[in-house]
Image: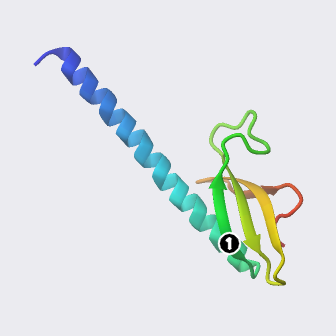
Amino acid sequence: MSDSFYFFGFICLAIALAVGLRILADRLDRSRIRKEIAASGGEVLDIMWNPFGRGWFGERSNRIYEVTYRTMNGKTLTATCKTSLFTGIFWSGDAPPS
């Protein structure tokens, strides 16, 4: 077989690995966000990845999510958070969980 065939296979494997790692990171992020909201007595209604959300400029490893949740008082809020595997969750905007 030719070298170009092996190169193409390597590129496909690299792309599959990158996509798989991104999916795994997304699941871990969502789990961390749900746990933090639950610890404050709230319930997550929706988590949406927003690559160009508040604070995106200059970020390399943090992922940004828009989180809609219900507080323990029944109020529905939407907040922006940044997270990565090693930095924890940082809330920005008007409505981080308390």
For image coordinates 74% across by 55% down, the residue present is: 81
Residue 97 visible in rendering: no
Reading the image, the residue beneath label 1 is 44
Which residue is more in the foreground, 44 or 60?
44
Count of numbered labels shown in the rendering? 1
Examine the image and state in which quarter residue 53 appears. top right
> What SS does tag 1 mark?
strand
Callout 1: 10 Å neighbours few (<14), some, many (20+)? many
Q: Position of residue 18 (x, y in %)?
A: 43, 40
For image coordinates 81% across by 82% down, the residue present is: 74
Determine whether, in the image, residue 1 is placed left or right of residue 47: left
Q: Position of residue 17 (x, y in %)?
A: 37, 41
Q: Is residue 43 above or below residue 1?
A: below
Which residue is more in the foreground, 86 or 51?
51
Q: Quadrant of the N terminus?
A: top left
Residue 64 visible in rendering: yes
Residue farthest to the left? 1
For image coordinates 65% across by 37% down, the residue present is: 60
Examine the image and state in which quarter residue 98 appears. bottom right
Q: Position of residue 29 (x, y in %)?
A: 59, 59
